[in-house]
Image (cartoon, grey):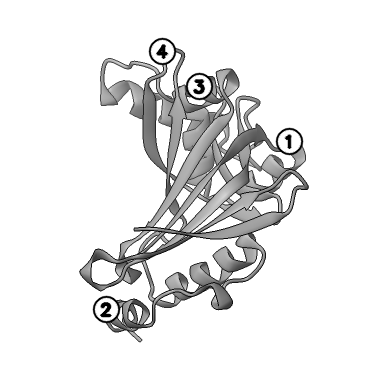
Amino acid sequence: MNSETLRRELMAKGLVRADLDTDPVKQFEQWYAQTIATESAEPGAMSLATVDARGQPWQRMVLRKLFDEKGFVFFTNYSSRKAEQIAANSRVSLLFPWQELGRQVKVTGTAEKIPTAESVGYFATRPRGSQIGAWASHQSKVIKSRAILDGMFDQMKHKFLDGEIPLPSFWGGYRVSPETVEFWQARDSRLHDRFIYRLNENAQWVIERLAP
């Protein structure tokens, strides 16, 4: 089924409380599987919002590489702007913009570095060029030209000419542990269906419908 046909079906059906899983991660898995089935270009792409020391929000698209009952994992340079902001304020938000299906998933929570062993395991699965790129780029730092970046890449390529490329000490993953997860389904007349999962004082998920 193509994405446009599925989008029309989902908009007509809508989203009701009875169809939601009690666990937001399992609900996310269901929606993610449907997005994968439409052959979306980047179903794991998500907007990550952080806040700097002045209270200025920043956003950027990153790739969610892993997710489980603990949360959503992305990888970055630990000296990047986003990492510096997370170090000062670990509260972040995520947005999965699955526009092909008229859906969004919004997450708020805290970001924390994952164990090095997990980062090593993921780094080993990356294409060799991406591994070299992690070593070559001083992410978010000012550079005078593209030639400097290309030169660093060539230097790292020569350095790691043979054998496995190790995980850089300055590179790894963050896991966003959710405190709220909102599922948004487009409907006609802008009367969209929205359900939010919130953790209560007993660390149990409560589900509520929101007005569009």
Q: Which residue is mark 3?
A: 85
Q: Which residue is mark 4?
A: 54
Q: CA distance from mark 1 to mark 4?
A: 30 Å
**The one of 196 and 137 positioned closer to us in this rendering:** 196
Q: Which quarter of the image is occupied by the N terminus?
A: bottom left
State if disc 3 and disc 2 touch (CB < 8 Å). no
State if disc 4 and disc 3 touch (CB < 8 Å). no
Tell me which amino acid carries mark 2: Glu
Circle 4 crowding by C-alpha within 10 Å: few under 14, some 14–19, many from 20: few
Tell me which amino acid carries mark 3: Gln
Front: mark 1 or 3: 3
Q: Which residue is mark 2?
A: 4
Tell me which amino acid carries mark 1: Thr
Residue at 32% across / 17% down in the picture?
143
* Residue 17 left/right relative to 70: left
Q: Percent from the top left, x then y, of residue 15?
A: 45, 74
Front: mark 1 or 2: 2
Front: mark 3 or 4: 4
